Amino acid sequence: MTSALALPGNRHVVLIGLMGAGKTSIGRILAKRLKATFTDADTEIEKAAGLTIAEIFRMHGEQAFRDGERRIIARLLDAPPGVLATGGGAFMDAGTRALIRERGTSIWLRADVETLYRRTRQRTGRPLLNNEDPMGTLERLAQMRYPIYAEADITIDTGAEKPRQTADRIIEELTAMTKQLGATRATA
Ligand code: S3P
């Protein structure tokens, strides 16, 4: 069951942003608060493939991962609305971006590269950062992706605050959006 209060237009709430932005941890909290389902696209890709993301990259290559990612996200966006966390590259695909725009409210969790580096450096499950220079990789990805992420419906800066506080701010934005939609409908 989803909450009518803050899923604007009864559409999915889709979290986007670079690795380490907090999409999964914030998404879980958000879903609980909204009494909505939470789905993590990366987990669904792993389930469907029966492999971890690192294994998919290693055995089949990044392109195969991207193809699977596009298909799985399309399927998830076909399901009843809830909170959906996507992998950092998902919104870069024009088709996926168009689908998210059609069926969801996109939220970019923006963070500076130092913060992302700090949050990702303990984990080894991210093949794109498994190299000599993960900080440089994050910088390059930020440069390439941030102009596209900026097309999201809502941008939230995540800094030193706790995921709970970020979730609170997102709920405020979603509630305002829901009210605005209601007001627009009432005057139409
Ligand atoms: C990727 C981000 C990862 C995962 C894959 C590729 C990317 O997800 O989908 O390793 O291209 O940025 P997270 O952003 O959840 O770490």
Image: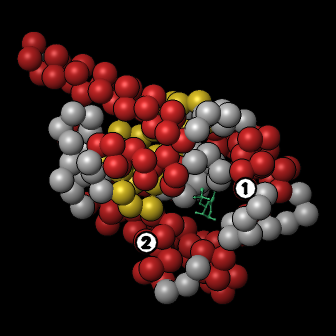
From the top left corner, tell me how far across and down residue 152 is, in percent.
Answer: 47, 35
The answer to whether residue 177 shows anywhere in this view is yes
Residue at point 58%, 79% (across, down): 52
Q: Amino acid at mark 1?
A: Thr
Count of labels in the image: 2
Q: Amino acid at mark 2?
A: Glu
Q: Quadrant of the C terminus?
A: top left
The answer to whether residue 92 shows anywhere in this view is no
- Which numbered dot is residue 120? 1
Residue at point 29%, 43% (across, down): 34
Q: Depth check: 100 or 169 in front?
A: 169
Measure the C-alpha gap from mark 2 to mark 1: 21 Å
Q: Secondary structure at mark 1?
A: helix
- Which numbered dot is residue 44? 2
Q: Depth check: 30 or 17 in front?
A: 30
Which color scheme is applied? secondary structure
From the top left corner, tell me how far across and down residue 63 is, in percent.
Answer: 60, 72
Q: Nearer the viewer, mark 2 or mark 1?
A: 1
From the top left corner, tell me how far across and down residue 132 is, in percent.
Answer: 91, 63
Q: Earlier in the sequence, mark 2 or mark 1?
A: 2
- Does 94 sit left or right of 80 as displayed? right
Q: Quadrant of residue 115?
A: top right
Residue at point 72%, 46% (across, down): 116
From the top left corner, tell me how far across and down residue 114 is, in percent.
Answer: 79, 40
Q: Secondary structure at mark 2?
A: helix
